[in-house]
Image (tube, grey):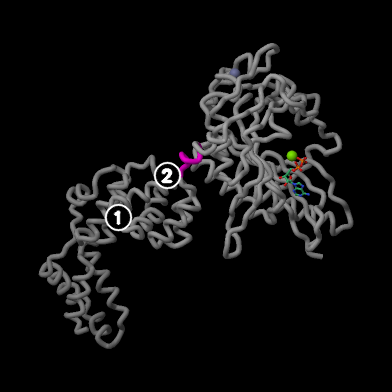
Amino acid sequence: MQYEAVIGLEIHAQLLTDTKIFCGCSTEFGSEPNTQTCPVCTGMPGVLPVMNRKAVEYVVRTGIALNCEISSHSRFARKNYFYPDLPKGYQISQFELPLCEGGYVEIPGNGSNRRISLTRIHLEEDAGKNIHVGTTRFREGSASDSFVDLNRAGVPLMEIVSEPEIRTAKQATDFMKKLRTIVRYINVSDGNMEQGSLRCDANVSVRPEGMKELGVKTEIKNMNSFRFIEKALEYEIKRQVKVLQEGGRVVQETRLWNTEKGITESMRSKEEAHDYRYFPDPDLVPIEFDTSWIDEIRTHMTELPDVKKKRFMNEWDISEQDAELLASERSTAEWFEETVKLGADPKAACNWIKGDFMKLLHEDNIQISESRIKPLNLVEMLGLIDKGTISGKIAKTVFEEMYKTGKKAGIIVEEKGLLQMSDESGIESIIDDILADNSDAVEKFKAGENKLMGFFVGQVMKETKGKANPKIVNEILRKKLGR
Ligand code: ADP
Ligand code: MG
Ligand code: ZN
């Protein structure tokens, strides 16, 4: 029997506000434990949370970008459970009235895009972090000391929940990548997965191909890398199919991805899982705003990646694959657009960005905006190639030097003596020497071995350190060799 996987994702994205969701504490990452806390976010009794307006705005912005229905009447609920990193004994979240409902994300499909529907987006607070250290002789694998860092408690999160419309591990990572691109574009989250600003719980079930009802699902918690998500889902789908094929039943449970072993492991079964006793938070008034506020946010939205991509293809004749690459990071897309605005040929600029430039940026693990090369530098260098001042080959050296030093192309060419050699008599005398030194090859060429042309050109380039104008070299060689 053929089985089909069904996947729904719950994604948490940390919002880029400077302060926490219900107090003025900083949200900066990596500070000393418990230095960014106050009575509100440490859950002291008798203090009142105050809503951070920016956090609401960021979720509304996301709702607009993801085509959701945005509710101008939503409210917070208490989600009650005990955990040492949650001093209040409840998390403030949204339950029956979330900020956004519906909407979709487009991911690449066969030929055309595939739409994955969203269930909802809601706003909530993050919990703190437990840190377990040392070993104890009482029980293997247990720690001798446990600490709680509450710097993260009360940091604003939005949770984006998808419908169970994803069918493969690859689609799940495509979905996640697209979401990351979008939240970064609209500046609501930095999408930093290593720091946990973007993380994902994956719900997965399998069912016989063609069956309508959903199978029993498991939930793989808290994954923060595309590679882990894909691997964990591939593993979990295979595991469930095997269980069914052997006549067993999948148990509804929460599982964790074990990176070292490359398997998912049971963490807790759903039976012992919770009834959260949600109820409206009496400390917070409902979130209400005029719908004109949504329109105002909409008018200030940046162009989204899919729109940019189409524009690059239609206006500048960039291939779909290249347009996708250029549009996938806002800083890259804007850098590219700037070069074109300054007069670069779009295709030439694209080729330099996706080739030499991305390689260098990748090696240094930096964004294009952090590079010493500015759009105008590339435009000037392309101009030197067009005018024949430097060859395409020399340009590679110039580009690397621009990358290292931030100097202008013209200055590098002058300082390093990289001017293209276009003086015909000079090139001719070099060619004469080469032909004289390689009379065997000349004979063979005349006897019909055409591919030796490449050899001669190569020799000239070697002799001139790549500076000879290739067009002139070819012309003179043809003339001398009688072609
Ligand atoms: P829970 O109450 O267990 O959290 P929800 O109904 O809220 O479950 O759904 C959580 C996520 O699980 C959603 O993304 C949803 O699309 C997905 N989901 C629900 N049922 C299934 C299923 N049978 N198989 C795969 N995913 C599912
Ligand atoms: Mg869930
Ligand atoms: Zn605080």
* Residue wearing tag 2: 331
- Tell me the SS state at disc 2: helix
Labelled disc at residue 165: none
Specify the farthest residue to the top: 46
Among all residues in the image, which is located at the extreme bottom?
447
Residue 328 screen position, x and y as percent: 48, 50
Residue 473: where, in percent of width, then height? 20, 71
Q: Which residue is mark 1?
A: 344
Query: Residue 19 versus residue 76: which sits nearer the camera?
Result: 76
Which label's residue is closer to the chain start, 2 or 1?
A: 2
Residue 306 visible somewhere in the drawing: yes
Asked if labels 1 and 2 touch by Cβ distance under 8 angstroms, the answer is no
Task: Residue 138 in the image: state x and y as whole percent.
Answer: 80, 24
Q: Is residue 131 visible?
A: no
Q: Is residue 313 left or right of residue 60?
A: left
Q: Is mark 1 within 8 Å of ligand 1?
A: no
Closer to the camera in the image, 25 or 287? 287
Q: Looking at the picture, which amino acid does disc 2 mark? A: Ser
Label 1 sits on a secondary structure element that is loop
**Quadrant holding ligand 1?**
top right
Rendering quarter of residue 168: bottom right
Q: Quarter holding the N terminus?
A: bottom right
Kindly tell me whether mark 2's CB lies below 8 Å from ligand 1.
no
Disc 2 crowd, CA 10 A, few/some/many (<14, 14-19, 20+): some
Asked whether 143 falls inside the magenta stretch, the response is no
Is residue 77 shown above or below 385? above
Quadrant in which residue 445 is drawn = bottom left
Check disc 1 and give the amino acid type: Ala
Q: Residues within 10 Å of mark 1 (few under 14, many from 20)?
A: many
Q: Is residue 300 magenta?
A: yes
187 vs 167: above or below: above
Residue span colored magenta:
297-302
